Image (spheres, coloured by chain):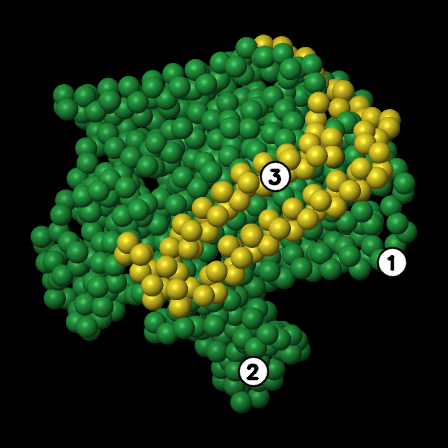
Chain colours: A yellow, B green
């Protein structure tokens, strides 16, 4: 296996890789996605659990629903949310042509 | 970057085969041990084989991955594919506390323990959307590298290093304690010796090959730990419900627990100390009714663990090792998936263990308890027996409150509870060891890299030749490891509560400066330095003050009633654990209760309507601002840090154009990074 040191990126570039307008539009859309995922994070991490006492009255397969969300439901939302985020961000990268070569 | 990833690297291409072969080999090894057990080989020999062989394999991977190249040593050559980096992060992340302790905490706390499950998974969303891709694009070696490049050099770098060392050191000490506990039980040596045996296992993995060795070892350790965690859970589920799908079937166990709890209460019994009597009920006090402080504590803990996850340098530095920004993002998703596999199984362990104990143990005569209970009625390193039957009313029957079980036993004893052969118990031990070793490896590397790369190379000698840097790095790794082992050997298990502190400290010290550095262009150097310092000092100061100077703390933030109550609590503690002066001071307050005044900052202590109070924990009177346990100390430091950065940025000169160009560059995946100060370049 090659043991060559990879110094090119660390050395630093001298000019911007994308023009200013593209960069700004890209960042705006990326920020939008960030806020969307942050909102999902907040609802799954905190919001749903505010209702845990009432949700617990409903039982599915023996699980009180409030308990289920904190033990499993929110976790599934986190995992699926992150794969979705990675895919969506790749689409945005390609839309603006800023993906890595 | 481009050329090296385009050509198929033969090593990377064959990773799938290598680890498939490894997994198959491990399975064959487990089967071999099972056969040996049937042939009558004693358990102790099997224990040696399990511990010895797994550590041997990790050491072998560590040795064949040795390297003299800086980029290999610090970031594994940046060619770890997303999936494998995800596995490595998973085992880097899941420590002895996750593997052994989590299910036990859930057993004791019921719904309240789910704060750990939520907090230790949800944080990865913050990592993925706010930090990982941008740190990867920045493309240097350590988290303090980023702080140095973004915030004008050594001052910011130094604060970053201080926070990193504080958080990582308390964390690594706890891991070494975990290694010691497992090694002690399965090799039958003293705790002090066990700690150093474990340490040797940790060091061979990380010393020679740095990040490269740690990465490939951690992948191997993940495979062992997840197999070891899932197999007993599947077998336990089959035993209790008849269907081997623990994550789906434990709902029925929860229902049964609820019924059993109601039955116990109807019979006039109470749960043992520290165990909730309402397993699935959220936010309740000791009486089973809704409790506002319980709800506030739950959400505060979730918040601190999540933000702390996104600020712990040993986790963030794993995303420096992927080949691209795109892979870094995918890698966070994979990390969380691999962590999820364990965390969504932990509540099942807790529920099945509880059903077994409530159904088959409670109400039985003490003389007729099953053998597995007797096996665990031995002394733990915590100073009480692992399972302690306290016959409170001396009727010879195990009442609900008589059965005291240490949380760690819930996972460790599952194989015996389910009546499985010893090979499964050995498997669980190997898994716990893999979890503790892998986390300790990652933490030690983060510590040693901060000291060698950030302090020695960047701050002391910028002209140091590569060979000397790597030697210094290894020497420091050894020193840090010995210091951690020495602390672990002396403090023993009493320090495990410190682990949760690491999250609050990292969260308050680093999170705001990292996030604002990427997302708020106007963040100035002075603002970030101030923000990190304020967050760190406020949180660390609060933790120490409330933990060890609880009476003093409440005299500042408490109302007069809270002060008197705290003084009374001091009187209830065993005098061996507290100083003469403290006892005298408390007695004077109680004697003079009528004249006690509110503390100077009592208005602040009562700001959100839940009074500041104290509780007796760990033989100390521990202060709780707004009734929030100090395990969630970051709840104050994190917002304070953000606020400081934002406010100071308003009043200090905006960052230079060069710095803004730098930020523009780290925000887009394409192209290189223009550093504002070329001296911040690595190499």
Calculate the distance from the C-alpha at mark 2 to the C-alpha at mark 1. Answer: 40 Å
Question: Where does the image place residue B403, in percent across and percent down from the top left?
Answer: 23, 58
Residue highlighted by disc 2: B560
Q: Nearer the viewer, mark 2 or mark 1?
A: 1
Structural crowding at the residue carrying mark 3, measured as other residues with C-alpha within 10 Å and reported as few (<14), some (14–19) or many (≥20):
few
Q: Are marks 2 and 1 in contact (CB under 8 Å)?
A: no
Observer-nearest of B540 and B197: B540
Q: Are marks 2 and 3 in contact (CB under 8 Å)?
A: no
Of the 4 image quadrants, the one containing the C terminus of chain B is top right
Mark 2 or mark 1, which has the lower sequence index?
Answer: 2
Structural crowding at the residue carrying mark 2, measured as other residues with C-alpha within 10 Å and reported as few (<14), some (14–19) or many (≥20):
some
The subunit carrying tag 1 is: B
The subunit carrying tag 3 is: A
Q: Which mark is residue A2?
A: none
Residue highlighted by disc 3: A88
Instruction: Determine the residue positioned at 88% across, 49% down.
Output: B654
When the figure is inspected, residue B391 is found, relative to residue B194, above or below; the finding is below
For mark 2, give the secondary structure: helix
Same subunit: marks 2 and 1? yes
Instruction: Determine the residue positioned at 62% across, 55% down.
Output: B540
The subunit carrying tag 2 is: B
Q: Which mark is residue B651?
A: 1
Q: Quadrant of residue B332?
A: top right
When the figure is inspected, residue B328 is found, relative to residue B297, above or below; the finding is above
Instruction: Determine the residue positioned at 15% across, 66% down.
Output: B394
Structural crowding at the residue carrying mark 1, measured as other residues with C-alpha within 10 Å and reported as few (<14), some (14–19) or many (≥20):
few
For mark 1, give the secondary structure: helix
| Extreme residue toward the bottom, this view | B594
Question: Where does the image place residue A74, in percent across and percent down from the top left?
Answer: 46, 51
Viewed as shown, does residue B350 lie left or right of A23? Answer: left
Of the 4 image quadrants, the one containing the N terminus of chain B is top right
């Amino acid at each position: 296996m090659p043991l060559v040191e990879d110094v090119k990126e660390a050395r630093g570039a001298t000019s911007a890789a994308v023009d200013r307008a593209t960069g700004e539009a890209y960042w705006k859309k990326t920020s939008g996605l960030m806020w969307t995922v942050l909102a999902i994070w907040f609802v799954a991490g905190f919001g749903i659990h505010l209702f845990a006492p009432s949700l617990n009255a409903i039982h599915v397969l023996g699980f009180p629903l409030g308990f289920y969300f904190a033990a499993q439901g929110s976790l599934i939302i986190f995992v699926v949310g992150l794969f979705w985020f990675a895919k969506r961000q790749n689409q945005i990268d390609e839309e603006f042509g800023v993906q890595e070569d | 970057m481009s050329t090296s990833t385009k050509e198929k690297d033969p090593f990377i291409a064959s990773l799938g085969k290598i680890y498939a072969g490894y997994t198959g080999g491990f399975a064959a090894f487990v089967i071999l041990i099972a056969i040996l057990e049937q042939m009558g080989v004693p358990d102790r020999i099997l224990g040696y084989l399990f511990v010895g062989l797994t550590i041997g394999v990790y050491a072998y991977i560590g040795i064949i991955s040795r390297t003299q190249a800086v980029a290999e040593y610090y970031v594994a050559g940046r060619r770890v594919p997303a999936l494998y980096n995800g596995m490595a992060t998973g085992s880097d992340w899941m420590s002895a506390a996750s593997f052994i302790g989590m299910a036990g905490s859930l057993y004791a706390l019921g719904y309240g323990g789910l704060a750990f499950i939520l907090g230790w998974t949800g944080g990865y969303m913050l990592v993925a959307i706010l930090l990982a891709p941008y740190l990867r694009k920045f493309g240097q070696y350590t988290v303090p590298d980023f702080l140095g490049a973004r915030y004008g050099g050594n001052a910011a770098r130094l604060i970053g290093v201080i926070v990193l060392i504080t958080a990582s050191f308390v964390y690594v000490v706890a891991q070494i304690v975990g290694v010691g506990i497992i090694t002690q039980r399965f090799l039958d040596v003293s705790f002090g010796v066990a700690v150093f045996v474990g340490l040797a296992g940790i060091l061979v993995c990380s010393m020679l090959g740095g990040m490269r060795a740690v990465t490939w070892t951690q992948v191997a350790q993940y495979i062992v730990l997840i197999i070891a965690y899932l197999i007993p859970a599947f077998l336990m589920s089959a035993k209790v419900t008849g269907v081997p799908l623990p994550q789906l079937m434990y709902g029925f166990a929860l229902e049964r627990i609820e019924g059993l709890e109601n039955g116990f209460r109807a019979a006039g019994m109470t749960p043992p100390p520290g165990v909730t009597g309402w397993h699935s009920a959220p936010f309740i006090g000791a009486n089973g009714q809704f409790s506002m402080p319980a709800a506030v504590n739950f959400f505060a803990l979730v918040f601190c663990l999540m933000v702390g996850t996104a600020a712990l340098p040993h986790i963030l530095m794993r995303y420096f090792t992927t080949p691209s920004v795109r892979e870094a993002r995918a890698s966070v998703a994979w990390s969380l998936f691999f962590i999820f596999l364990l965390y969504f199984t932990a509540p099942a362990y807790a529920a099945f263990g509880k059903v077994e104990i409530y159904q088959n143990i409670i109400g039985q005569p003490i003389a007729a308890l099953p053998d597995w209970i007797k096996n665990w009625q031995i002394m733990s390193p915590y100073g009480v027996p692992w399972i302690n039957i306290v016959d409170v009313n001396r009727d010879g029957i195990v009442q609900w409150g008589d059965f005291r079980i240490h949380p760690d036993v819930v996972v460790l004893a599952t194989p015996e509870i389910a009546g499985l052969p010893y090979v499964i118990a050995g498997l669980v031990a190997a898994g716990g060891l893999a979890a503790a070793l892998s986390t300790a490896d990652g933490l030690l590397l983060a510590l040693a890299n901060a000291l060698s790369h950030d302090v020695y190379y960047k701050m002391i000698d910028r002209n140091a030749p590569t060979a000397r840097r790597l030697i210094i790095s290894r020497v420091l790794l050894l020193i840090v490891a010995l210091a951690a082992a020495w602390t672990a050997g002396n403090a023993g298990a009493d320090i495990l509560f410190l682990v949760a502190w690491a999250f609050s400290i990292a969260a308050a010290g680093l999170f705001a400066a990292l996030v604002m550095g990427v997302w708020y262009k106007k963040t100035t150097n002075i603002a970030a330095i101030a923000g990190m310092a304020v967050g760190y000092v406020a949180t660390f100061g609060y933790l120490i003050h409330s933990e060890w100077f609880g009476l003093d703390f409440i005299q500042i933030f408490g109302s007069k009633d809270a002060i008197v109550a705290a003084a009374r609590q001091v009187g209830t503690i065993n005098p061996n654990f507290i100083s003469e002066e403290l006892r005298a001071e408390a007695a004077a307050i109680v004697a003079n209760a009528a004249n006690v005044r509110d503390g100077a900052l009592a208005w602040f202590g009562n700001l959100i309507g839940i009074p500041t109070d104290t509780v007796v924990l760990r033989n100390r009177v521990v202060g709780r601002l707004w009734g929030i346990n100090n395990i969630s100390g970051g709840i104050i430091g994190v917002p304070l840090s953000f606020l400081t950065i934002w406010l100071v940025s308003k009043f200090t000169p905006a960052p230079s154009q060069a710095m803004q160009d730098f930020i523009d560059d780290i925000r887009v995946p394409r192209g290189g990074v223009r550093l504002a100060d070329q001296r911040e370049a690595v190499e």
